[in-house]
Amino acid sequence: MTMINVKVAAIEQVTPLVKHFTFVKEDGSSLPAFSGGSHVVVSIDIGGRVHRNPYSLMGSPMENEAYHISVRRQENSRGGSVFMHENVTVGMPLKITYPMNLFSLAKKGRKHILIAGGIGITPFMSQIADLKRMGANYELHYAFRSPEHGAFAAQLKESCGDHLHCYIDSNATRLDLQALLSDQPLGTHVYVCGPSAMVVATLETARNLGWPENHIHSEQFLSPPIGEPFKIQLARSNVEIQVSAEMSMLEAIEAAGVEADFLCRGGVCGRCELDVLETDGALLHNDHFLTDSEKASCKKIMPCVSRAKGERLVLDL
Amino acid sequence: MERGYWIKSKPVYNALVWHEKATAHLVLAQNQGGLAVLKLFQQMQPQQPVTVIYAQHDTDYAKTLKKVVPDGLDVVSSEQELLVSLKNIMPSMRMGLRVYVAGSEGFIWSVAEVLKTFGVEEADIMKELTDTLARTIYCVHCKAITHNITTNIGKCSGCARMLFVRDHFSRHLGAYMGLMIDAESPGELPEIEEIYP
Ligand code: FES
């Protein structure tokens, strides 16, 4: 995959846990245009291991001088976010992918209800720029833990005005999904990004109320979990690869110099799917893409987030 | 029609089945479509509110429908009247409404066109084809729309060209493509047969 060389132009601590990074092209030229809801994958090198994590682009899609992402510090993870928080400094060169969009606004939508939880606000930042430009009817419902954790809340208040509704756990204000989704005009689309419980609750509420599937949109990138090391064999490339505890299978494949497809790197898009030719152990499926029966069949695996146990796992790559 | 050849734009119609998850149901039917509605109520009486608008001209399912549909049945005498009633009730409908349509293809797509203006996407409408296979065609030459074509070749109501009725369907126009058949050798027409009775 072709990468863009950028450098960090600014870093801002937005909340105690969230940092906002501004990237510009290393050679000073403009960045490619993108649409609201897009993300890029950022490559970072942690002690010789290349991690590639997806982050939503937050700026206005109209601005092509700089890209903006926000990273929430996640302890007990593979270290990507901690590295971004502690080791990435202004002026540092980084490689990112071209923007890709798995969370775009429905063009035919009459009204758009955006539901964000915590750092899940990021994809909506660029969508709101699009919605405002189109003069679209929208509401942004933003839930966060406590006032100091409401990243960009003040900025959003200014740009969205009455369209913004905030729910703050510490003030015991809660978003009533049932009430919100049971009284919307025809042609409304709902979009959710946030913690898993919130995404599931939104999807279920909308479905139970009879919202058609194509009016319900969600984005939830999973981060590859840490696990036991294991070995894989790539049949077509004829190599054996060791997947270490903190690397994803996809990262290990890439580190071995084998080209593999991906879009989200978070177990949702389906692009990285690989056929399993042989396995003697268990596949540890962590994705949201394969159906339960596909997972049980042990014939396919999503290497961006899933892992394996056992001595032998042969993949068709 | 060539065997095993499938034109993606050609709509597929199904038998009406209630959506289990809904906050309200709206059923629109014409003529023989009344039977489709009766079959729907054979499945069950949904818990949520149901509105049925039925346009009948030469069939009489209205009597039976009146017995079966608990309330919210509106019987009208033409498609035009049905579309007027539809336009009147749509503004009060909210997300969670599920829509079912049964009737001729022309009926289905005129209903879909009205529904679209209220934010209901065609893909979200359940459709059952009844009555006739007659096609509405649009002339690719003069753009005129001609209704009720039951033959493989039909005369354009706009430019009077003889049009071959194709399987390519425009959801936007609710019509099949009609292409001049004797462009190469004017006047030479293959046999005209009824294939969309
Ligand atoms: S890259 Fe999207 S599911 Fe793996």
Image: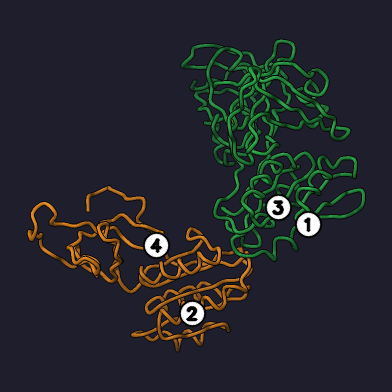
| Percent of width and height locating residue B185 | 8, 54
Give the number of the mark in front: 1 or 4: 1
- Marks 1, 2 in one chain: no
Amino acid at the residue labelled 3? Thr
The kind of secondary structure element at disc 4 is loop
Whether residue A238 sits left or right of residue A212 in the image: it is: left
- Chain under callout 3: A
In the rendered view, would you say A271 is above or below B91? above
Residue B84: image tag:
2
| Nearest to the observer: residue A125 or residue A172 | A125
| Nearest to the observer: residue B87 or residue A223 | B87
Do labels 3 and 1 touch, CB within 8 Å?
Answer: no
For label 3, the crowd category at 10 Å Cα-Cα, with few meaning under 14, some 14 to 19 and many 20 or more, is many
For label 1, the crowd category at 10 Å Cα-Cα, with few meaning under 14, some 14 to 19 and many 20 or more, is few
Supply the letter of whichever chain is green.
A
In the rendered view, would you say B5 is above or below A246? below
Give the number of the mark in front: 1 or 2: 1
Amino acid at the residue labelled 4? Tyr
Residue A202: image tag:
3
- Chain under callout 4: B
Give the number of the mark in front: 2 or 4: 2
Which residue corresponds to mark 1? Answer: A162
**Inter-mark Cα distance, 3 to 1:** 22 Å
Q: Residue A302: tell me if it is visible.
A: no
**Inter-mark Cα distance, 1 to 4:** 43 Å
